[in-house]
């Protein structure tokens, strides 16, 4: 057994720069609140903790079970052979067993991190000139920013609009509401931030603060007032607020690799890179396959489900 404080201390000390919140104790509490089976594994050598992994155990009817460790395990660990089809890992160490197979990245393998230890003047100076202009444009239109907003009803409408426009699937509304409820306090805190124009919410983000990093987890904006450039001012105010609270990094949570012109994230990556930052990469998502036949069947079923969804 391990308590919350010891667990989070290890994660804070040893986790990678991006995505550490996914291994926080509080994220596990949130995952349980939405029905996931969460298992916390501690790896020891000579009685000392050398690694941890917060695993999500999932069963596939008629096929078998597997476990997923988002942005983990952290530190030194060993795959456990317990009858599962496979283990899905996002360990920052690329020294994986030879039978590990690269799969679709579930969490961003490439991201952009802005250093907030710089002054506001320096942060603005390193931005693309169009980004600075759009921040000023939103200010001139008197866009109002609520860094910690409770207006989820109007924000949810924007999330639905953005998903329809971008042709991607959202989690249920309950998923996001439970996230905000479960992660309401430090050390891992999620919150809603909104931008309003003429008393109407026109942009909204869900952010997470953990390990001195503010992560841009989800974002949305309406199509009606796009020329007002509210998302630019929203992020700038979030960056300034993070600085005021002693947060040193702003993780944009996913960009296309540098030079990837036709990547699905090319457009949003141009927006994010306009704020400037350091490209940070990780190995990505891998499956450690224990049962080849069952795993092959699982991959086939997954491919069919994606085609019909």
Image (cartoon, rainbow, N blue to C red):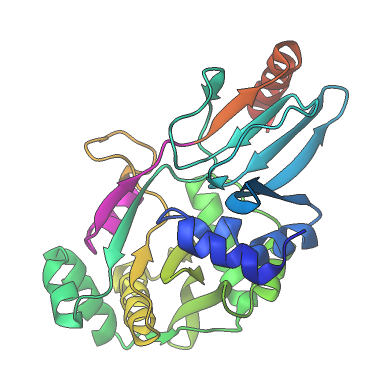
Along the line of sight, which residue is nearer the eye, 248 or 161?
Answer: 248
Residue bounds of the magenta highlight:
267-284
Residue 101 placement (x, y as % from top left): 54, 22
- Residue lying at 35% horizontally and 74% vertically, measured from the top left: 230
Q: Residue at x 74, y 24 (%)?
A: 85
Q: Quadrant of residue 27?
A: bottom right
The N terminus appears in which quarter of the rendering? bottom right
Q: Position of residue 277 (x, y in %)?
A: 24, 59
Q: Is residue 162 left or right of residue 308?
A: left
In the displayed structure, 137 sits above or below 77; it is: below
Q: Is residue 255 above or below residue 23?
A: above
Which residue, as the protein is rendered here, is positioned at the far right?
Answer: 62
Is residue 109 shown above or below 165? above
277 drawn magenta: yes
Q: Nearer the viewer, residue 261 or 213?
A: 213
Answer whether residue 130 is magenta in the image. Answer: no
Residue 158 position (above or below residue 69):
below
Which quadrant holds residue 143? Answer: bottom left
């Amino acid at each position: 057994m391990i308590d919350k404080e010891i667990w989070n201390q290890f994660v804070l000390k040893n986790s990678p720069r991006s995505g550490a919140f996914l291994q926080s104790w509080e994220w596990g509490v949130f995952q349980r609140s939405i029905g996931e089976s969460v298992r916390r594994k501690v790896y020891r050598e000579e009685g000392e903790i050398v690694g941890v992994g917060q695993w999500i155990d999932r069963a596939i009817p008629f096929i078998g079970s597997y476990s997923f460790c988002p942005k983990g395990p952290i530190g030194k660990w060993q795959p456990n052979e317990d009858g599962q089809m496979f283990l899905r890992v996002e360990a920052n160490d690329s020294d994986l067993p030879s039978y590990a197979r690269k799969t679709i990245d579930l969490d961003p393998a490439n991201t952009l991190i802005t250093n907030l230890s710089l002054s506001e003047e320096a942060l603005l100076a390193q931005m693309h000139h169009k980004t600075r202009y759009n921040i000023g444009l939103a200010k001139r239109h008197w866009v109002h920013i609520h860094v910690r907003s409770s207006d989820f009803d109007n924000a949810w409408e924007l999330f639905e609009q953005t998903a329809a426009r971008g042709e991607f699937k959202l989690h249920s509304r309950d998923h996001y509401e439970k996230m905000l409820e479960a992660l309401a306090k430090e050390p891992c805190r999620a919150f809603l931030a909104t931008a309003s124009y003429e008393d109407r919410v026109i942009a909204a983000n869900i952010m997470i603060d953990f390990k001195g990093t503010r992560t841009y987890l989800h974002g949305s904006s309406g199509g009606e007032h796009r020329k007002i450039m509210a998302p630019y001012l929203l992020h700038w105010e979030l960056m300034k607020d993070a600085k005021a609270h002693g947060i040193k990094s702003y993780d944009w949570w996913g960009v296309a690799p540098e030079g990837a012109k036709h990547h699905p994230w090319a457009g949003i990556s141009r927006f994010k890179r306009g704020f400037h930052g350091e490209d940070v990469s990780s190995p990505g998502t891998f499956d450690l396959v224990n049962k080849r036949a069952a795993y092959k069947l699982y991959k086939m079923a997954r491919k069919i489900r994606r085609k019909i969804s």
